[in-house]
Image (tube, grey):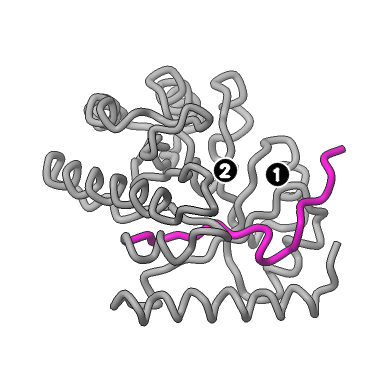
Amino acid sequence: MIKETEFLENLSKVKSEIASSCLKYGRSLDEITLLPVTKNWPIDAVTFCRNSKIKSVGENRVQEALSKMDGNQSMNFELIGHLQSNKAKHVVGKFSSIQTIDSLKLMDRVNSVALLNDLIQPVLLQVNAGNDPAKFGVSIEDTEALLEHAVTLNGICVDGFMTIAPYDPQNKSVARSCFSNLRNLRDQMSERFDCRFSKLSMGMSGDMDEAIAEGSTMIRVGSALFGNRAPVV
């Protein structure tokens, strides 16, 4: 695990890159939320973020995230990893947002658990906007039907959309096209359902610039802040 001084240096660099992209594309810095991804890192990573006045972190694995929540009640945890429906009972009400709703089955399960606990769970719909067979997510074509079902449910609130771009470091236009697809989809769904769907979670360490260019409101950053991933135990 890196030292906190190194984290602060990395955080300053990432914020500077985000500011530069905002300036380049005419975006307001206030429109962009930085979500540090603390997956595979010890609790120190969350502590560093809290000390830096960062209010939310992203986690991929349910059990790992739950173990980090103890003693960190002031932090919001957002689930950005694939969620199996049988684990919904461990997630609903614990995470400030579930960014990876990608099926009717999962949506219904999250809704049922939320109703049982008398709460409304904020979610994002994960869309495979880059048509990448290696990625989870509902297809662009099936998103409207998923939203039509979502508006009938009382236990969830769809705040927007999330995507992961296909990995192609040699051709940045691949990521930008994916992000453009999601932004266009959001605009179409906003008009169709008369709802802002204000959150667009797209862009990571390697494609922040392209995501900001296409309207991202949340950048999920891990390696640029914490370095290479810690080995999975």
Q: Is residue 209 left or right of residue 63?
A: left
Q: Residues within 10 Å of mark 1 (few under 14, many from 20)?
A: many
Which quadrant: the C terminus? top right
Residue 15's quadrant in the figure?
A: bottom right
- Vertical relation: 68 (above or below) 111: below
The amino acid pointed to by label 1 is Ala
Q: Residue at the far front: name it.
A: 170
Q: Residue at x 71, y 42 (%)?
A: 66
Looking at the figure, which quarter contains the N terminus? bottom right
Q: 222 or 181: nearer the eye?
A: 181
Tag 1 residue: 65
From the image, tell me which residue sits under label 2. 79
In magenta stretch: residue 216? yes
State the image coordinates of residue 121 (x, y, percent, origin top left).
44, 39
* Kind of element beneath mark 1: helix
Tell me whether the residue at label 1 lies in contact with that at label 2, contact meaning CB atoms closer than 8 angstroms.
yes
Height in image: 176 above or below 2? above
Q: Which quadrant would residue 75 be assigned to in this image? A: bottom right
Local crowd size for mark 2, using a 10 Å CA cut-off: few (<14), some (14–19), many (≥20): many
The span picked out in magenta is: 215-233
**Depicted 221 relative to depicted 232: above or below:** below
